Image (tube, rainbow, N blue to C red):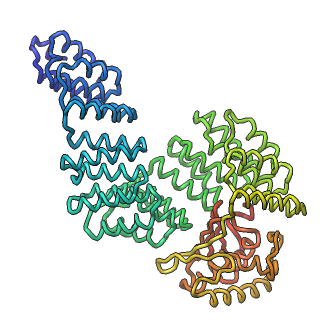
Amino acid sequence: MQVFTLDIEPNHYTFSIGLSICASVRAVEEGRQLHAYIVKMEYFAYPAVGNSLLTMYSKFGMMDEVEILFKELPEKNLISWTAIITGFYRQRCFAKALRQFCHMRESGEDPNEHTFVVVMASCGCMFVPMYGRMIHAQAIKFGMASGVFVGTAILDMYSETKQMDDARKQFEEMGVLASDVSWNALVAAYVRNGKMAEALEAFDRMLGNGVSCDQFTYSNVLKVCSSIPSLSSGQQIHAHLIKFNCESNMHVGSSLIEMYAKCGNLADAEYVFHSMPTRDMISWNSIIKAYSQNGYPKKAIMHFRKMTEEEGIKPTSITFVAVLSACSHSGLVDEGLDLFASMIRDYEIIPEETHFSCMVDLLGRAGRLEEAKDFASNLPFKPKASIWRPLLAACRSHRNLKMAEFVAERITKLEPGDPTVHITLSNMYAESGRWGDVDKIRKILKLSELKKEPGCSWIEVSNRMHRFYSRDMKHTEMPKVYGKLNDLVKQIKDLGYTPDTSVVLHQGVGVSKEEQVLYHSEKLAVCFGLLNLPTGKPIRVFKNLRVCQDCHSAMKFISEISKRDIVLRDNYRFHHFNQGSCSCGDYW
């Protein structure tokens, strides 16, 4: 405010600059004082001053003031309209932003690129593709749809509203005008819509066209490698990062840790973590989660202690999900209870649904079913199905049919379309010899057209994914695979392996119970790996369902006789088999 103390009379340029400075440094009180001077000295009528006021209050998030000022503006122009539209967008008032855009067009004011970018983003956030198409048509009319900024905003809008064909078409129409920003947006769009193969293909095209990638693109494609999962693709991207000296970026480094962890390569996840020049909370969360997912709970907790006590980094709710999960999968009940209490007491983190689910799982796995039930029943909110599911799994493991019925009833009320609840109950009824109840559930499944997801395992060999199902005959190498498996079974039986046929509750026609367990998909995938991967290389297999007791037992024997590390990830956790033992300690 020195201009006033020096008795220098400001003009509209001075006020505009002053308001812009206040907006950029969020000087709210000084901005209000300038506003008072503007009113007193009657400069509000100047368009530049009025628009600067609108922009300032918009950046402050004070939309009530913006609306009042906007109505009082003697003259509205493109800058005025864009300021109020942008303000509403920043405050996540997307409907109001779109409404103001409509009023702007009704007033006869033409939009510019910035206006189109903001309203496209609003359409995406509101999930209203119909409005997005209408605004896209206007962008074409004004010749802006193929430009880098508007074109990329249109692409983002279509991807946010799950219209990936339109997003791809928009990108292709940009042609040579597509910039680094557009390419990065395309990769992100594929990832956002779960089209992982297309995301990797787009990334390869980017590199082929010499387009530079940013940290977000690298993180996105590493996320793709994690979800497929494809260790070889992840390793190629890591090599690219090393070549262009990008791996030291903390954001990228954390994504690398997560990729290696989700591909079951814990050694490389550790290497990346220890090679990082600096580590932040996200890096620590990534390595703690890596240990938790891969069945090394003590290392997860040790790194949690290092992070909080030695590095002085405050944990987040995500950190606690990882350490609580580690305790749950390893039977560290007291440690888990202490950590949960510490989260609330020492770090003032309000527990979320995932934390409560971890606690129910922790107690349930340990056989403390009544405590788990009481915990779930006395939450500060009505428990969702995700809270009850781990308890149902625990009821199955500990053969508590009465409680399983209680829990199943609650899950089916919340999510009637989930077939796994009925299947779990059916299996428990079969184990108890209650075949009448088994038939009832079969009828329910048939009437509801609910189907059990078939077990599927896959393994990556020579950059290709090979999928297997139980008693599969589709793969071209199945005769060799079955031959290898039969030889292995003979060898591991000599070591003491006995097929666990207790997992077979419904014997197939013309197939013995032993045959039913011997040819599960994960065994076939492991044998395919043994036949096709170089000697000594770890076998990494992924499965969509929980590994059964028989396969878990067989894997320990196979790892011993083949002298191979076998990494098996099911839909619950990783199992690292080495020399006849598993990282889970047979607690899963």
**Side of 139 where 325 appears, left or right:** right
- Where residue 377 appears, x then y in whole percent? 75, 38
Is 521 placed above or below 203 here? below
Residue at screen point 10% across, 18% down: 11
Q: Quadrant of residue 347?
A: top right
Q: Which sits in the foreground, 331 or 402?
A: 402
| Location of the C terminus (image quadrant) | bottom right
Q: Which sits in the foreground, 229 or 291?
A: 229
- Where residue 32 appears, x then y in whole percent? 27, 17
- Where residue 557 appears, x then y in whole percent? 73, 78
**Side of 448 where 214 appears, left or right:** left
Residue at screen point 63% across, 64% down: 574
Residue at screen point 60% across, 54% down: 300
Q: Which sits in the foreground, 308 or 25?
A: 25
- Where residue 132 appears, x then y in whole percent? 34, 46
**Side of 330 where 93 appears, left or right:** left
Q: Quadrant of residue 206?
A: bottom left
Is 568 placed above or below 51 here? below
- The reply to whether residue 546 is in sight is yes
Residue at screen point 60% across, 47% down: 321
In the current view of this chain or complex, which residue is farthest to the right?
A: 433
Figure disc tally: 0
- The reply to whether residue 309 is in sight is no
Q: Quadrant of residue 173?
A: bottom left
| Location of the N terminus (image quadrant) | top left
